[in-house]
Image: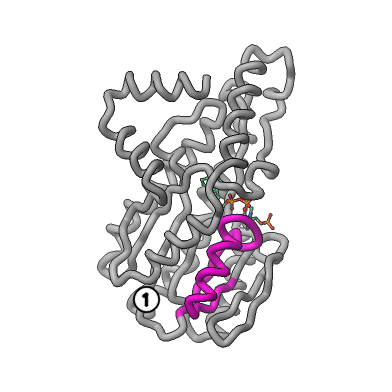
């Protein structure tokens, strides 16, 4: 980014990947408006950079607009947005109601859409800006019992790639980051579809074992700083990559998912998780 002290709006900044990203961006001299519903996370004002925690629910258009107006009033510009806020819901598709599926799409997809939509007029008026979205390797690997999470992350990945073509003429760049298992508050915040918690569900045993294994993998996963560094690196580049999968092993998984015959790939995923 060209600005001397870039101004970044980061969603989901109070915890996990967002909190680590805010710290790293701040250390690199950026001013980070770190948004979450709670408005939590550390406030930093250092000679290098700043972290300004703000309360903003990405599902509330008025709140998103208010934060962007505040940033413009205080800073006169906005250089980048990192759409990281997210949550997860687990359970077999048959055990998940449409309302519960909508919950998954509300924050992870429409929350990002609301935030991006609100930033785009600002970026166009400035003649440039950067959009980073935080998807998941679950976007390229179909995860059983987290089918809606996989679906929403695939949708966010596709949205980022499609939008990049629309906004390129305005000098706006896009990047989608696909983290693998990362040790954050995500595991504890995960919701389960109500019917999936009924031991009488035909999926109950497999779902419980499978999601239990995934949760163990998350809690033994990468430090959130690994993802934060990848986001910082992209924001520091003259030209951002469109898709970034941090860490070699997850990058290899992504490549294999594209190259392997689908039947073989599904067999491997099934062996691991169902
Ligand atoms: N952890 C993993 O293994 C992993 C792997 C791949 C991708 N990801 C993705 O990484 C992103 C960050 O997750 P994390 O692992 O760092 O989880 P986390 O520790 O639970 O952090 C989630 C953040 O999102 C915020 N948030 C949730 N709903 C929000 C809303 N409606 N409006 C504004 N902020 C909201 C939370 O703050 P409040 O509760 O205060 O709002 C929190 O700051 C998510 O998109 C997740 O899907 C995580």
Position of 163 with respect to 43 (left or right) is left
Q: How is the image coloured?
A: one colour
Which residue bears the numbered disc 1? 1
Q: Is residue 32 magenta?
A: yes
Choose between 12 and 124: the one closer to the eye.
12
> Could you say which quadrant of the image residue 85 lies in?
bottom right
Position of 118 with respect to 54 (left or right) is left
Question: Which residue shows up at 46% across the image and 20% down it?
Answer: 270
Other residues around mark 1 within 10 Å, as few (<14) / some (14–19) / many (≥20):
some
> Could you say which quadrant of the image residue 120 lies in?
bottom left
Question: Which residue shows up at 53% across the image and 85% down it?
Answer: 75
Residue 224, percent from left and from top:
55, 55
Choose between 203 and 183: the one closer to the eye.
183
For residue 180, above or below residue 74: above
Residue 3, percent from left and from top:
40, 83
Residue 112, percent from left and from top:
51, 55
Mark 1 lies on a secondary structure that is: loop
Number of marks in the image? 1
Q: Is residue 137 magenta?
A: no
For residue 253, above or below residue 171: above
Question: Which residue shows up at 54% across the image and 78% down it?
Answer: 31
Confirm if mark 1 falls within 8 A of ligand 1.
Answer: no
Choose between 241 and 80: the one closer to the eye.
241
Quarter of the figure with the N terminus: bottom left
Residue 101, percent from left and from top:
59, 35
**What stretch of residues is rendered in magenta?**
6-33
Question: Which residue shows up at 68% across the image and 70% down it?
Answer: 42
Position of 270 with respect to 11 (left or right) is left
């Amino acid at each position: 980014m060209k600005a001397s002290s870039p101004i970044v709006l980061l969603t989901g900044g109070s915890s996990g990947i967002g909190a680590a990203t805010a710290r790293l961006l701040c250390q690199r001299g950026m001013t980070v408006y770190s948004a979450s519903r709670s408005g939590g996370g550390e406030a930093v004002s250092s000679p290098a950079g700043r972290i300004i925690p703000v309360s903003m629910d990405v599902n509330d258009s008025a709140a998103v607009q208010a934060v962007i107006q505040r940033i413009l009033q205080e800073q006169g510009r906005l250089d980048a947005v990192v759409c990281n806020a997210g949550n997860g819901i687990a359970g077999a598709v048959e055990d998940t109601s449409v309302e519960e599926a909508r919950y998954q799409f509300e924050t992870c997809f429409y929350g990002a859409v609301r935030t991006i939509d609100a930033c785009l007029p600002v970026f166009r008026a400035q003649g440039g800006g950067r959009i980073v979205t935080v998807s998941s390797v679950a976007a390229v690997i179909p995860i059983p019992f987290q089918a809606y999470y996989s679906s929403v992350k695939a949708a966010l990945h596709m949205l980022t790639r499609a939008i990049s073509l629309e906004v390129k003429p305005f000098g706006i760049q896009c990047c989608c980051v696909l983290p693998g298992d990362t040790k954050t508050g995500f595991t504890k915040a995960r919701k389960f579809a109500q019917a999936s918690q009924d031991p009488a569900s035909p999926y109950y045993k497999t779902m419980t074992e499978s999601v239990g294994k995934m949760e163990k993998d998350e809690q033994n996963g990468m430090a959130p700083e690994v993802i934060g560094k990848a986001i910082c690196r992209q924001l520091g580049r003259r030209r951002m990559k469109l898709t970034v999968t941090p860490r070699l092993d997850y990058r290899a998984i992504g490549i294999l998912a594209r190259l392997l015959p689908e039947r073989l790939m599904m067999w491997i995923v099934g062996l691991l998780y169902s």
